[in-house]
Image (cartoon, rainbow, N blue to C red):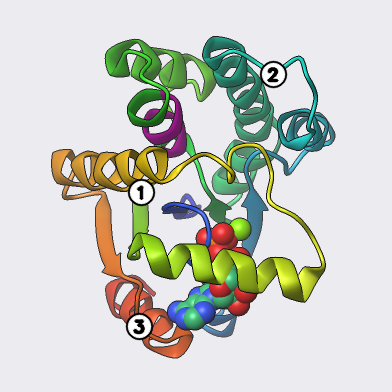
Amino acid sequence: MRRGLFISFEGGEGCGKSTQASRLKSSIESAGYKVILTREPGGTWLGEQVRRLIKDQSDDIPCARAETLLFLAARAQLVEKVIRPALEEGVWVISDRFSDSTLAYQGYGRGLDLEELAKANDFACSSLKPDITFLLDVELEESVNRRLEREKKLNSSADRIELEGKEFHSRLREGFKELAAKEPARFTVIDANASIDEVQERIWTRLKPLV
Ligand SMILES: Nc1ncnc2c1ncn2[C@@H]1O[C@H](COP(=O)(O)OP(=O)(O)O)[C@@H](O)[C@H]1O
Ligand SMILES: [Mg+2]
């Protein structure tokens, strides 16, 4: 049986990852493939607990290394319990964020060593990498507007990481672009400032030859 395709979505807050991941799931299903959509941190019981720990506001703010290890624990569980078994059964997997987010947030964002983080990622994922990674790139202003829009819609509030300042988010954006430049075969950078339909079309153009 052919192994499933593993696709990840990356980019800063509010760039449209969740919107596009869910649309892509429908398109792939319509093309006749089995596909699961998962998110990071989350996708397993352990992962959802980690998500809560990371998003909670507390005085005991996790230091950068602790934060990294929390994300990695969630990822290890997701790879072992969900992603690998699905791929081996020929099911496609879409992940809303994956290992590149660790390099961007904890590396470029928080200043931890990129090589050390890459090794830690490898350990957590037992070397699994996405086949295709879509980096949704939007202007910082646009991403802030979209995030606020979403908070209004869902009646939610920004979490600890979303509330980081402009410089942090700008380092993230540049970091993601550098990561994409280092692995052009895996990454497709999408200008995601356009409408939801237009961005969806750009993503599908990349995938169409594979279905
Ligand atoms: N291309 C787009 N144009 C305008 N609004 C968008 C676009 N993509 C997503 N949005 C809206 O912006 C908000 C954030 O999108 P979301 O998919 O949740 O981003 P992310 O998962 O990357 O944080 C949502 O309210 C969504 O409906
Ligand atoms: Mg999202």
Q: Nearer the viewer, residue 210 or 182?
A: 182
Considering only vertical position in the picture, is 140 above or below 161? below
Q: Position of residue 57 (x, y in %)?
A: 78, 32
Pick whichever of labels 1 and 3 is earlier in the sequence: 1
Q: Position of residue 78 (x, y in %)?
A: 66, 34
Q: Is residue 84 left or right of residue 137?
A: right
Q: Nearer the viewer, residue 89 or 97?
A: 97
Pick whichever of labels 2 and 3 is earlier in the sequence: 2
Which numbered circle lies on residue 131? 1
Residue type at mark 1 is Asp
Pick whichever of labels 2 and 1 is earlier in the sequence: 2
Label 1 to label 3: alpha-carbon separation: 25 Å
Q: Position of residue 55 (x, y in %)?
A: 73, 37
Q: Residue at x 50, y 52 (%)?
A: 1
Look at the numbered disc 3 and give the secondary structure of its residue.
loop
Label 2 to label 1: alpha-carbon separation: 34 Å
Residue stretch rendered in magenta on the structure: 101-106
Q: Quadrant of ligand 2?
A: bottom right
Which numbered circle lies on residue 194? 3
Q: Is residue 106 left or right of residue 146?
A: left
Within 8 Å: ligand 1 and the Cβ of disc 2? no
Residue that carries the numbered disc 2 in the rendered image: 61
Q: Residue at x 37, y 60 (%)?
A: 140
Q: Residue at x 78, y 19 (%)?
A: 59
Look at the numbered disc 1 and give the secondary structure of its residue.
loop
Q: Nearer the viewer, residue 25 or 140?
A: 140
Q: Position of residue 22 (x, y in %)?
A: 61, 71
